[in-house]
Image (cartoon, rainbow, N blue to C red):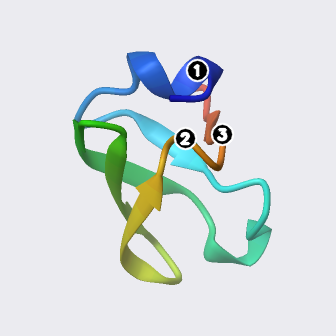
């Protein structure tokens, strides 16, 4: 997993730097490097944590 992705837990708010138009997303799960996030503008997406680093949003 890339950097910060290792500490992501359900409920945390994140952004996908590669897709800023998706808006803020809430982490649903982080299992085996697969991070499921429910984004405001995109819906539920599974991110490969070994290929993309998500950015944590300050609450």
Alpha-carbon distance for marks 2 and 1?
Answer: 11 Å
**Which residue is tagged 1?**
4
**Which type of secondary structure does the marked residue at label 1 adopt?**
helix
Give the image location of residue 4, x and y in percent: 58, 20
Res. 27 in view: yes
Above/below status of 35 relative to 11: below
**Which type of secondary structure does the marked residue at label 2 adopt?**
loop
Side of 38 relative to 58 (left or right): left
Side of 31 relative to 37 (left or right): left
Quadrant of residue 24 in the image?
bottom right
**Which residue is tagged 2?**
50
Residue pictured at 25% horizontal, 36% vertical: 32
Specify few, some or many for label 2: CA neighbours under 10 Å numbering under 14, 14-19, or 20 or more: some
Residue pictured at 49% horizontal, 83% vertical: 42
Q: Are marks 1 and 3 in contact (CB under 8 Å)?
A: yes
Give the image location of residue 23, x and y in percent: 62, 67
Which residue is nearer to you in this view: 21 or 32? 32
Quadrant of residue 8 in the image?
top left
């Amino acid at each position: 997993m890339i950097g910060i992705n290792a500490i992501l837990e359900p409920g945390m708010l994140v952004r996908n730097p590669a897709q800023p138009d998706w808006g803020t997303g809430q982490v649903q799960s982080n299992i085996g490097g697969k991070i499921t996030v429910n984004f405001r503008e995109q819906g539920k997406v599974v991110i490969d944590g070994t290929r993309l680093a998500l950015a944590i949003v300050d609450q």
